[in-house]
Image: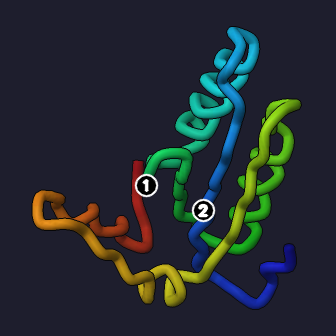
Amino acid sequence: MNLSEYRWMWIIAMFDLPVATKKERKAYARFRKELLEDGFRQMQFSVYTRHASSRENAEVHLKRIEAMVPESGEVRVIAVTDKQYGRMRIFWGKNRHPPERPPAQLELF
């Protein structure tokens, strides 16, 4: 994925991992835990997002995901610009609350 023309990025990881056996459930839990440790936040079931401050930073996280994919299942990752992410249309039912707003461009820890 060539991200060289973009500056601020959002990484969206979507996965479908099997959980039929104890080994598969353990691999699923490990993958999810590693995503969280890498700064991803759950957006929906099996959909996690993370803001990247630069295209180089996005590439680092993409490589990390690639390295932690379990042997079974499927993981898809897409990187979008802030502008594209901001144009996302979100619909929710009467009993649901609006989603959290994205963080500011620069976060200090």
Image coords of residue 21 (percent x, y): 71, 13
**For numbered disc 1, what is the local secondary structure?**
strand
Disc 2 residue crowd, few under 14, some 14–19, many 20+, Cα 10 Å: many
Horizontal arrangement in the rendering, residue 100 relative to residue 11 (left or right): left
Q: Amino acid at mark 1?
A: Met
Image coords of residue 67 (percent x, y): 85, 40
- Residue found at the very far top of the displayed protein: 22
Image coords of residue 41 (percent x, y): 46, 48
Give the quarter of the image for residue 91: bottom left
Residue highlighted by disc 1? 43
Residue at the location (53% across, 63% down)? 51
Horizontal arrangement in the rendering, residue 43 relative to residue 97 (left or right): right
Decide: is 105 above or below 97: below
Do the CB atoms of the residues marked 1 and 2 lie less than 8 Å apart?
A: yes
Give the quarter of the image for residue 28: top right
Residue highlighted by disc 2? 12
Q: Which mark is residue 96?
A: none
- Residue found at the very far left of the displayed protein: 95
Please report whichever mark, 1 or 2, sits nearer to the chain's N-terminal start.
2
Horizontal arrangement in the rendering, residue 42 relative to residue 76 (left or right): left
Horizontal arrangement in the rendering, residue 91 relative to residue 40 (left or right): left
Disc 1 residue crowd, few under 14, some 14–19, many 20+, Cα 10 Å: some
Q: Amino acid at mark 2?
A: Ile
Residue at the location (54% across, 53% down)? 47
Give the quarter of the image for residue 93: bottom left
Q: Nearer the viewer, residue 20 or 1?
A: 20
Residue at the location (83% across, 47% down)? 66
**For numbered disc 2, what is the local secondary structure?**
strand
